[in-house]
Image (cartoon, helix red, strand yellow):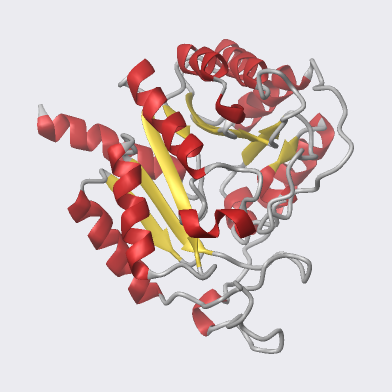
């Protein structure tokens, strides 16, 4: 079982997982603006450890389609349970907030909505369109659920031309029944491969959490699978247990090991890889995307 060698509750986190929280006027302004607009951020809902830093830099990952998920993944702090129909005004409110924050790089994600026939794809498209109306120059990165393998829904999102399409593989296939019981490893790989086939200009991205019980060989094989699916950007971060009802941490991965994984990923063929204890899907997302432009210019 995954819990056999779990780190005991009383064990303190290693020193590299302790960070100072920046605060101040800008952070409070961002919180106030998000609350006033009645929109959600995954930063808040998923208890991201980088929230103070990102809000203080006027960045956030907007979460559409409500704040409750149809799935109950054992690693995720986002609430699940009864859901309301999507708010038709939400895309416009997100775009207005993007404009007020003066963002030129925007990350949009969502809860998983298996109750919707298209998995919420229409709202991703609407949100992209509303942002482009308000901030035409903005670059847009999407972090989407698997849409239950709905190819037409995925095609509609690709046709809206996001700059980056991220779908996290999250963990190695052996751990899916425990970590992501309602997800399918092959389906997530197929999604990334289909995006590359729909539009090769869309940069595909994915990521894993380490510390759930995976081994080195499994990580390497998963990275190979991602590369074969056309994934170009990678994130690797430390899994941190949100509450006692979530999966326990199996081990804390050192910064040096994360550095080694970045070297391995680049040698394997990823254009860029962000690897570190506090790395999350959209952490420094703009900087990661900019490496693709640099890579393209060097190749030409």
Asked which quadrant contains residue 62, the reply is top right
Image side of residue 28 versus residue 156, left or right: right
Image side of residue 43 versus residue 209, left or right: right
Q: Residue 148: horizontal and vertical position, in percent?
A: 61, 29
Q: Residue 143: horizontal and vertical position, in percent?
A: 54, 35
Image side of residue 86 versus residue 266, left or right: right
- Relative to 183, is 103 above or below? above
Q: Residue 197: horizontal and vertical position, in percent?
A: 34, 20
Task: Name the residue located 80 percent from the left edge and 22 percent from the top edge.
Answer: 86
* Quadrant the C terminus occupies: top left
Task: Name the residue located 35 percent from the left edge and 69 percent from the top edge.
Answer: 216
Task: Name the residue located 37 percent from the left edge and 52 percent from the top edge.
Answer: 222
- Relative to 103, is 160 above or below? above
Image side of residue 59 versus residue 300, left or right: right
Q: How many marks?
A: 0
Task: Name the residue located 88 percent from the left edge and 28 percent from the top edge.
Answer: 84
Determine if residue 279 is in view: no
Asked which quadrant contains residue 75, the reply is bottom right
- Relative to 226, is 5 above or below? below
Q: Residue 122: horizontal and vertical position, in percent?
A: 65, 15
């Amino acid at each position: 079982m995954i819990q056999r060698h779990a780190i005991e509750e009383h064990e303190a986190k290693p020193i590299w997982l302790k960070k100072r929280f920046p605060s101040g006027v800008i952070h409070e302004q961002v919180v106030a603006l998000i609350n006033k607009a009645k929109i959600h951020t995954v930063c808040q809902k998923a208890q991201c450890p980088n929230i103070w830093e990102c809000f203080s830099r006027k960045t956030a990952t907007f979460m559409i389609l409500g704040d409750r998920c149809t799935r109950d993944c054992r690693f995720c702090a986002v609430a699940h349970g009864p859901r309301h129909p999507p708010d038709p005004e939400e895309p416009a409110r997100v775009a207005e907030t993007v404009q007020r924050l003066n963002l030129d790089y925007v990350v949009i994600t969502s809860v998983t909505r298996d109750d919707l026939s298209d998995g919420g794809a229409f709202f991703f498209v609407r949100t992209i369109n509303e942002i482009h109306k308000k901030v035409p120059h903005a670059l847009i990165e999407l972090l989407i659920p698997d849409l239950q393998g709905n190819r037409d829904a995925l095609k509609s999102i690709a046709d809206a031309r996001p700059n980056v399409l991220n779908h996290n593989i999250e963990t190695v296939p052996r751990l899916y029944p425990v970590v992501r019981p309602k997800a399918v490893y092959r389906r997530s790989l197929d999604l990334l491969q289909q995006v590359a086939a729909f539009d090769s200009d869309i940069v595909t991205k994915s990521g894993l959490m380490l510390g759930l019980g995976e081994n080195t060989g499994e990580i390497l094989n998963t990275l190979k699978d991602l590369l074969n699916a056309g994934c170009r950007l990678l994130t690797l971060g430390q899994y941190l247990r949100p509450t006692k009802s979530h999966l326990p941490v199996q081990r804390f991965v050192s910064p040096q090991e994360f550095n080694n994984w970045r070297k391995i990923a680049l040698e394997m063929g990823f254009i860029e890889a962000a690897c570190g204890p506090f790395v999350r899907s959209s952490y420094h997302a703009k900087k990661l995307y900019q490496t693709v432009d640099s890579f393209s210019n060097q190749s030409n």
